[in-house]
Amino acid sequence: MKCVSLVAMSVVLLIGSQSAVAQSQEDIDVLLGAAAGAAIGSTIGDGDGRRIATALGGLMGANWARNRSDHRYAGRRFESICKDRIPTQYRNNSGVARSWVEGCVARLEQRQAELEQQAYEEALNGPAN
């Protein structure tokens, strides 16, 4: 219980110590993920094993939160790109414009997945000629 309280207090101090300008939602998400992971890890084992589980839980929670944050950022970035490119004839009809943006985002996400797969295969097999 002391460990959970210590982790919670550390998170509060870290969040509070950051300047308002430097504080981003991603940083807060990572800190909360680390705190949640540490809290879950602190319920495992006892003694030194509990300390190790707490530390590993914190690292895993922070990593999980960072991955989720990266995925959300990519979706917002694609949406922003697509909103800037709505064809003029669709701008006056919000339903059509929204559908166009959704389709655009889906195509960009698909293309990103294809490029990631291609990069993965090139890393394994070398560049295709």
Image (cartoon, rainbow, N blue to C red):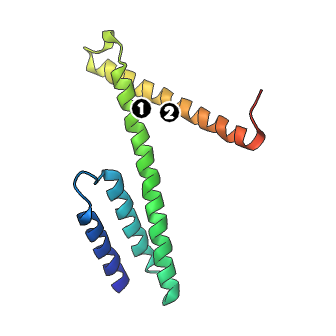
- Reply above or below: 72 against 22: above
Q: Amino acid at mark 1?
A: Phe
Q: Which residue is mark 1?
A: 78
In the rendered image, the quadrant that contains the C terminus is top right
Q: Nearer the viewer, residue 89 or 15?
A: 15
Percent of width and height locating residue 13: 26, 70
The picture quadrant where one finds residue 78 is top left
Q: Amino acid at mark 2?
A: Glu
Q: Residue at x 76, y 38 (%)?
A: 126
Percent of width and height locating residue 108: 49, 29
In the rendered image, the quadrant that contains the N terminus is bottom left
Q: Is residue 48 left or right of residue 84?
A: right
Q: Secondary structure at mark 1?
A: helix
Q: Is residue 1 visible?
A: no
Q: Nearer the viewer, residue 117 or 22?
A: 22
The picture quadrant where one finds residue 87 is top left
Percent of width and height locating residue 44: 48, 81
Q: Residue at x 43, y 51 (%)?
A: 68
Q: Is residue 128 left or right of residue 118?
A: right
Tags 1 and 2 touching, CB below 8 Å: yes
Q: Residue at x 34, y 22 (%)?
A: 84
Q: Which residue is mark 2?
A: 109
Q: CA distance from mark 1 to mark 2?
A: 8 Å
Percent of width and height locating residue 94: 27, 20
Furthest residue toward top = 89
